[in-house]
Image: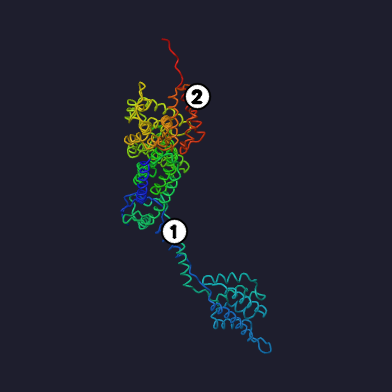
């Protein structure tokens, strides 16, 4: 117990000291792996590479070009000049006032017309030219001079109205004639007078307005410049993008200013490569993944213990694929070693932990592959298949099955992904090829590295358990030779534990191998245990009860010493220490009570006769405790009947429950029923008698 506590404290110290180092190492690896490959090129040189955008980025060259074009396309801004508008109105009013005065001058005070119509027209033409610089045609001059008063008034009103309307808009030299023409067209058109000597009303208005009106639009330099700056800013705020995967330059092409600018935008030029923004992003990214992983580890099933050595092994299994990703991702995005992690984690921690923790490792690798979605899909399939196969606790996985199924799963996943995305045949073939290579090589590497992880760690992996199950193991050979009765007892306990663990879904392989070694502590003095005694000689008959109980109850702790010396996995060490829990050997306690009663002394303290181990903390350890007690009781009583065997098993289990030996085992009452049934099934075969052959 003290050693376990020391180990736990040591592991905590190592874990808390390694975590910051581990996190910093991961951040450094991901940062280096996320930096794109750089090229030593200059403007005007010929490219020796095919360069493709490794990520999306703003194209500053194209963005600037578009912004300048948008700026130059902004037309000059004109505003209405109130002064010019007022002048135009006044000019029209003065013109018609002047014309009315000329018309009035042709009539004396008695109403007599002084000149002929033609003479008046000639006078109009000359006077208007001198006063307004307006060259009227003979017909227009004739019309202005001779139309009736009513028609002249209509003409004047229309001209004034059109002028007022036009002054509401900013009109320049180009737009003023057009707007005059459009405005005049909206008024009713008719020939003034009664014969062809008179001009059309619209023609006369157009001549007058075009000659007298001035453009009222003035150039607003400030507003124009502001509009152009706004257009420029809008274009800058909607930048052109270099999309990921875009071919920037091919071999043999000249590096133009535009290409050079794009390479600079993508950080593909050699030189200073420190990217603070990228580093901060990776720190936050890794922190989130670490938080998720820590949250899971705190709430995961504690069935699989992790000591300091195993923790180091798992950290290595996590780091190795990430570090390899720096180089593998440059070869091909799908060339990933993530399945390596899933195999190792599932082997040590089971299927669920293998899937979850390997998925987190895959997320860590993603930045180095530019968040390739195909890698996510293919990796998840590979992680799931490899974890399920490797994490089987009841038997060792088949290496060929693991390699073949994981590789095929990745191949079909890649094929399906490319089929959905309608990729070309060449791209599909390349993806399938690299998916197969990545998954296959990762599984093979994980299988090949298992012996190395076994040296570092101290957990009960399937491979390690199978090695320990070999009867040629030194401890089992010693048990067979030095304590044959204990050896036979352990074999029977292993059969019972294996069947019971299989029935309740526990780790049958661990239960079986743990049973082989649970009594190795008896090797210290095998003759003091009844199953190894011969010829009816019992050394305890010549020993004090205190000495006998000391020898008997010491074999779990003695076994733990041998287990540590032989580097047995931590779960087996726990089984050795826990298989008797804190129970009391009844025979010696009852003997001590009887002697105390006969001598009239106080009854002995039961705690002094109890084992100094701890109650079972796993299902496998509890199963071995029950199997050990049942096998010993059935063997000592010589039971050969199944009903009697079942009754005895139930009594033993009931006693264990009453003594609180199963409170930490996580066994349910249903599990206990299945365990009894499994025991009976084993004994049914064991009790079967052979048919007697004739002599």
Q: Position of residue 666 (x, y in %)?
A: 47, 38
Alpha carbon distance from label 1 to label 2 = 86 Å
In x, y percent, where is residue 162? 60, 74
Residue 355 versus residue 676 in the image, above or below: below
Kindly identify the residue that appears in the image at 37 percent across and 22 percent down: 536
- Residue lying farthest to the front in this orientation: 600
Locate residue 393: give its quadrant: top left
Residue 24 vs residue 661, the one in the foreground: 661
- Element class at badge 1: loop
* Front residue of this view, candidates 111 and 610: 610
Label 2 SS: helix
| Residue 429 visible in the picture | no
The N terminus, quarter of image: top left
Query: Within 10 angstroms of label 1, few (less than 14), some, or many (20 or more) residues?
Result: some
Farthest residue in the top direction?
695
- The x and y percentages for residue 625 are 43, 32
Residue sitting nearer the eye, 390 or 419? 390
Q: Determine whether, in the image, residue 154 is placed left or right of residue 246.
A: right
Q: Residue at x 51, y 72 (%)?
A: 78
Residue indicated by mark 1: 239
User: Which of 587/116 is in front?
Assistant: 587
Q: Eyeballing the image, is 456 above or below 639?
A: below
Structure colour scheme: rainbow
Label 1 or label 2, whichever lies nearer to me, is 2
Rendered image: mark on residue 644:
2
**Figure quadrant of the C terminus:** top left
Whether residue 67 sits left or right of residue 186 in the image: it is left
Density class for disc 2 (Cα within 10 Å; few <14, some 14-19, many ≥20) is: few
Total marks in image: 2
Q: Position of residue 421 (x, y in %)?
A: 47, 44
Can the viewer see residue 693?
yes
Q: Could you say which disc has been placed on residue 667 in the image?
A: none
């Amino acid at each position: 117990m003290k050693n376990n506590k020391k180990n736990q404290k040591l592991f905590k110290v190592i874990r808390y000291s390694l975590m910051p180092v581990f996190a910093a190492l991961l951040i450094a690896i991901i940062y280096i792996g996320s930096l794109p490959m750089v090229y030593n090129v200059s403007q005007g040189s010929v490219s020796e590479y095919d360069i493709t955008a490794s990520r999306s980025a703003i194209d500053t060259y194209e963005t600037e070009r578009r912004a300048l074009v948008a700026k130059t396309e902004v037309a000059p801004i004109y505003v209405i000049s109130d002064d010019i508008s007022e002048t135009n109105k006044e000019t029209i009013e003065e013109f018609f006032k002047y014309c009315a005065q000329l018309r009035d001058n042709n009539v004396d005070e008695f109403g007599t017309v002084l000149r002929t119509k033609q003479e008046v027209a000639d006078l109009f033409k000359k006077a208007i030219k001198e006063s307004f610089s307006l060259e009227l045609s003979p017909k227009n001059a004739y019309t202005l001079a001779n139309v009736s008063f009513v028609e002249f008034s209509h003409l004047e009103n229309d001209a004034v109205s059109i002028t007022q309307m036009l002054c509401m808009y900013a009109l320049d030299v180009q737009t003023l004639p057009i707007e005059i023409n459009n405005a005049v067209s909206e008024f009713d058109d008719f020939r003034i007078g009664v014969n062809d000597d008179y001009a059309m009303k619209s023609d006369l208005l157009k001549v007058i307005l075009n000659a007298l009106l001035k453009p009222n639009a003035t150039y607003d330099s400030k507003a124009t410049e502001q509009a152009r700056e706004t257009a420029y800013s809008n274009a800058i705020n909607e930048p052109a993008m270099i999309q990921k995967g875009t071919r920037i330059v091919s071999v043999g092409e000249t590096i133009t200013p535009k290409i050079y600018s794009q390479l600079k935008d993508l950080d593909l030029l050699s030189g200073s490569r420190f990217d603070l923004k990228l580093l901060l992003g990776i720190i936050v990214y890794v922190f989130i993944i670490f938080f998720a992983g820590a949250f899971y580890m705190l709430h995961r099933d504690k069935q699989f213990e992790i000591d300091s050595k195993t923790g180091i092994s798992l950290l290595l299994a996590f780091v190795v694929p990430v570090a390899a990703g720096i180089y593998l991702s440059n070869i091909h995005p799908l060339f990933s070693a993530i399945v390596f992690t899933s195999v190792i984690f599932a082997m040590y921690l089971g299927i669920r932990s293998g899937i979850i923790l390997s998925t987190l490792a895959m997320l860590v690798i993603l930045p180095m592959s530019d968040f390739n979605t195909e890698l996510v899909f293919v990796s998840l399939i590979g992680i799931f298949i490899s974890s399920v196969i490797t994490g089987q606790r009841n038997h060792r996985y088949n290496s060929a099955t693991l390699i073949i199924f994981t590789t095929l799963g990745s191949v079909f996943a890649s094929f399906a992904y490319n089929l959905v995305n309608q990729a070309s045949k060449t791209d599909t073939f390349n993806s399938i090829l690299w998916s197969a290579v990545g998954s296959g090589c990762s599984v093979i590497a994980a299988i090949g590295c298992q012996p190395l992880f076994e040296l570092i760690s101290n957990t009960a992996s399937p491979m390690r358990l199978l090695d320990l199950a070999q009867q040629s193991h030194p401890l089992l050979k010693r048990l067979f030779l030095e304590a044959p009765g204990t050896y036979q007892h352990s074999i029977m306990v292993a059969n019972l534990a294996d069947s019971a663990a299989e029935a309740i879904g526990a780790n049958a392989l661990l239960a079986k191998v743990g049973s082989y070694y649970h009594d190795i502590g008896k090797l210290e003095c095998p003759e003091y245990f009844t199953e190894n005694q011969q010829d009816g000689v019992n050394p305890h008959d010549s020993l004090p009860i205190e000495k006998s109980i000391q020898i008997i109850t010491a074999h779990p702790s003695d076994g733990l010493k041998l287990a540590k010396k032989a580097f047995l996995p931590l779960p087996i060490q726990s089984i050795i220490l826990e298989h008797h829990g804190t129970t009391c050997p009844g025979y010696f306690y009852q003997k001590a009570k009887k002697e105390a009663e006969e001598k009239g002394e106080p009854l002995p303290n039961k705690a002094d006769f109890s084992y100094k181990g701890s109650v079972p903390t796993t299902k496998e350890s509890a199963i071995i405790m029950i199997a050990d007690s049942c096998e010993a009781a059935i063997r000592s009583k010589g039971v050969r009947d199944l009903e009697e065997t079942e009754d005895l098993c139930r009594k033993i289990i009931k006693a264990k429950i009453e003594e609180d030996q199963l409170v930490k085992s996580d066994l349910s009452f249903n599990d206990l029923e299945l365990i009894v049934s499994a025991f009976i099934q084993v004994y049914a075969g064991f009790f079967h008698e052979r048919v007697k052959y004739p002599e």
